[in-house]
Amino acid sequence: MTDRIPAQIIETVDPSQPIRLTPAQSGGPIHTRSFSGRFRNLRLLGGGLLMLLYFGTVWLNWNGRQAVLWDLGRQQFHIFGATFWPQDFILLSGLLIIAAFGLFFITVLAGRIWCGYACPQSSWTWMFMWVEKITEGDRHQRIRLDAAPWSAGKLLRRTAKHGLWLAISLTTALAFVGYFTPVRELVGDLARFELGSASAFWLLFFTAATYVNAGWLREQVCLHMCPYSRFQSVMFDADTLVVSYDATRGENRGARRKGSDPRAQNLGDCIDCTLCVQVCPTGIDIRDGLQLDCISCGACIDVCDSVMDRMGYARSLLRYTSERALQGGATRFLRPRLVGYAVAMTAMIAAFVWALEARPQLSLDVTKDRTLFRENIQGQIENMYRLKLINKTQQPRQYALALGDGPFELHGQRQIGLAPGEIADLPVSVTLLDETQGFSRELRFEVSDVADPASRVSTPSTFVAPSRAPQ
Ligand code: SF4
Ligand code: SF4
């Protein structure tokens, strides 16, 4: 596999007059050419859904509260009526493992397709490229503008481009910070110039990060910073679908007159127009073989298909196919690794759903006082505890406190009402009812929902008594 090809792109400032760029130019920013096609439409759909989800969800309300909100101050994560607490974050780990297996599955099946169609880095980069196109023109106009001396027109175009980039970056940052600070308050504070220092810092940070990532770094993030691009290649096998050039059909490449017989000129179907290079967001030539830099976006397939149509040749000189298919075999979709990932993912999703359903809606932590024991005015041995109760439901609840079996008596509040998400810190004492002393014994605190006694939690602790009966 070729790691990276030197960028020697054939330029068409005037499409009818191809010229070769200097190495300095080819090492500069990648200006992609506009194109259309079915994979572009698919990418627009993927990117559009991602943006709708990202920018839309933050504004949704649910039960009078922002539907998705990480309330860092109260250590709660709200998502559509469900609240997760730090104790539930094991579920989040489970979700991340499921997502990782999903990514493994899709990579073995179709290579780096996630990068091309749904990755936020790619989607924002495509959006920034679109802004570049509407402000500075198509590819050849942008290359000319780069090379042109500064003028009022160039300044205007550049200002418009960077202004729009910054506006998108700020909107992106507002949505991102809005998942951690109620977004309506955040926008109101911003409009009144009353932002807190933490919100202002994170807004600036994410605005800068978006602007730099999607505006300047672009494919460099995919090539050098994204860990997925490093390990995905080792997951490929001979049946993985990747964007490939059918060299058997395409070579020898070369220009020819439309309608002429290429075989008579010892030519294949590739007319060497380099359009596939010109539309590539990572600036590679896929005809050199599979490369780490390819994000499987299908742009080169779209443009090559349009060339094949114009030439009257069959489509799919560039296509998603497997190494096995290119060598004349049939791609195997049902293979052990793929089935293994699918089975593991299904089992994990089932376990996750079960854990989600079984998640207690009430939490009880018990802390024993540092004083081991004391004697009360009735001469009984007494231990002190602090109970921390959390109502994890979305409704107010009344809870009853009790002790499990044992020679103990609970003193203090026996019922408590908690608002949704409220945390109570209750001091209680427990006395020993029998004469047997000189031991440490387990006791259990039990809390149940008065309206639904089946919803209960039980937490163990220790009762300590002296080795001799007090005099
Ligand atoms: S777009 Fe197709 S015909 Fe043109 S250079 Fe690329 S592979 Fe060859
Ligand atoms: S080679 Fe083709 S599929 Fe790969 S990144 Fe470039 S345009 Fe996209």
Image (cartoon, rainbow, N blue to C red):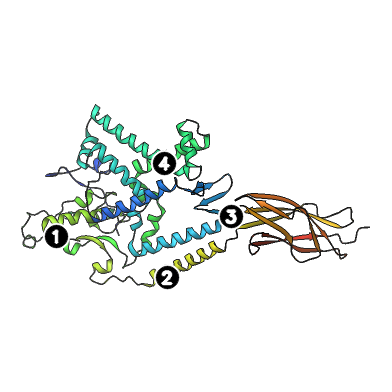
**Residue, x 21% and y 62% (percent of image)?**
246
Of labels 1 and 2, earlier in sequence is 1
Quadrant of the image where one finds ligand 1: bottom left
- Which quadrant: the N terminus? bottom left
**Front-most of residues 108 and 449:** 449
Disc 1 within 8 angstroms of ligand 1 (CB): yes
Q: Residue 209 has which mark?
A: 4
C-alpha separation, residue under disc 4 versus residue under disc 2: 38 Å
**Residue, x 56% and y 50% (percent of image)?**
76
Label 1–label 2 contact, CB within 8 A: no
**Front-most of residues 425 and 157:** 425
Residue tagged by mark 1? 269
**Residue, x 64% and y 50% (percent of image)?**
423
Residue tagged by mark 3? 393
Q: Amino acid at mark 1?
A: Asp
Of labels 4 and 2, earlier in sequence is 4
Is residue 151 visible in this depiction of the protein? no
**Is residue 368 shown left or right of residue 316?**
right
Front position among marks 1 and 2: 2
Disc 4 within 8 angstroms of ligand 2 (CB): no
Front position among marks 3 and 4: 3
Residue 260 in picture, x, y percent from top left: 5, 58
Q: Amino acid at mark 2?
A: Gly
Is residue 239 visible in this depiction of the protein? yes
Residue tagged by mark 2? 340
Q: Secondary structure at mark 3?
A: loop
